[in-house]
Amino acid sequence: MDQTKLKKKLDYYVEKYNQVSFIEQDPISIPHQFTDQKNIEIMGFWVAMLSWGQRKTIINKTKELIQLMDGNPYDFIMNHQESDLKKLIDFKHRTFNFTDTLYFIEYFKSYFSRQESLEQAFLSPAEPQSMKANLIHFHEQFFSLEFAPHRTRKHVSTPLRKSACKRLNMFLRWMVRKDDKGVDFGIWKRLQPNQLMIPLDVHVFKIAKQLGLLKRDKADWSAVEELTESLKVFDEQDPVKYDFALFSLGILNEPI
């Protein structure tokens, strides 16, 4: 397929799925339950980190977590008593368990006692224009608390381990992309859409290979960089909007 026809097809699926009707059955529906920025950021991040497996299960488990935090995660995190944490003991999603839940709570409590927005955590002091540097910086400071459990590190990826960082890049898309469609929030102002990297999972990887957008044979960070550069040919300022198209082709089996 030539570039002109491919762009037309990808743009068609972006338009079809970048709509409010997309929200309900996607994990992004979780932060859309809130109107205040801190809860949007906290639960957007949390559901993104839990996003493996069936979307329906991911959404239901995160709703359960919100209920356990009395419907207001930010308030619970900042004001809970030690005894309040007991009701979270049985919360689990796949390999994410009580130990991981407690660390997420303690990290957010520590962080939001000093900062107003999670965006600051994703800005590398040395290279804020490099998303790779930003993600490495975030991972380092996320696990900077002295009691950070080693097991929790597997739930938050980093390019240093050559990970594609799919869930982090998905969360950043939600927070940074700006348009009038009502899906992505666009509430962060320092990071820009042209810095974003494509969320790459096995489905998007397969479709990107089929479409000739990706030559690399492994779904790692180098593949993320290659695919994002390919998509910039179609829209240099907002390449990650094509996540909607690649997702629909890969997950929902729309025709190529």
Image (cartoon, rainbow, N blue to C red):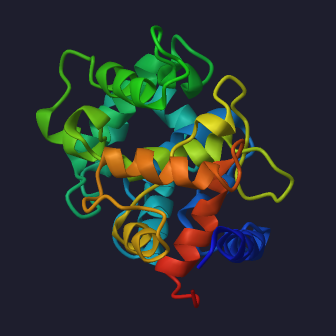
Task: Determine whether, in the image, residue 255 is placed left or right of residue 87.
Answer: right
Q: Which image quadrant is residue 104 in?
A: top left
Image quadrant holding the N terminus, namely: bottom right
Residue 44, image x, y percentages = 55, 47
Image vertical order of residue 234 relative to residue 154, above or below = below
Q: Residue at (33%, 45%) from the top-left corner?
A: 222
Place residue 237 in its image quadrant: top right
Residue 164 horizontal/vertical position (percent): 34, 49
Residue positioned most to the left: 150
Residue 106 percent across, percent down from the top left: 35, 27
Q: Residue furthest right?
A: 180
Along the line of sight, the residue nearer the viewer: 196 or 123: 196
**Visible in this render: residue 69?**
no
Q: List x then y, in percent, for residue 192.
A: 67, 32
- Above or below, 3 against 142 in this view is below
Residue at 57%, 40% (x, y): give it. Answer: 196
Quadrant in the rendering for residue 182: bottom right
Q: As displayed, is residue 105 above or below residue 169?
A: above
Left or right: residue 146 compared with residue 45: left
- Left or right, 146 with respect to 134, comes to left
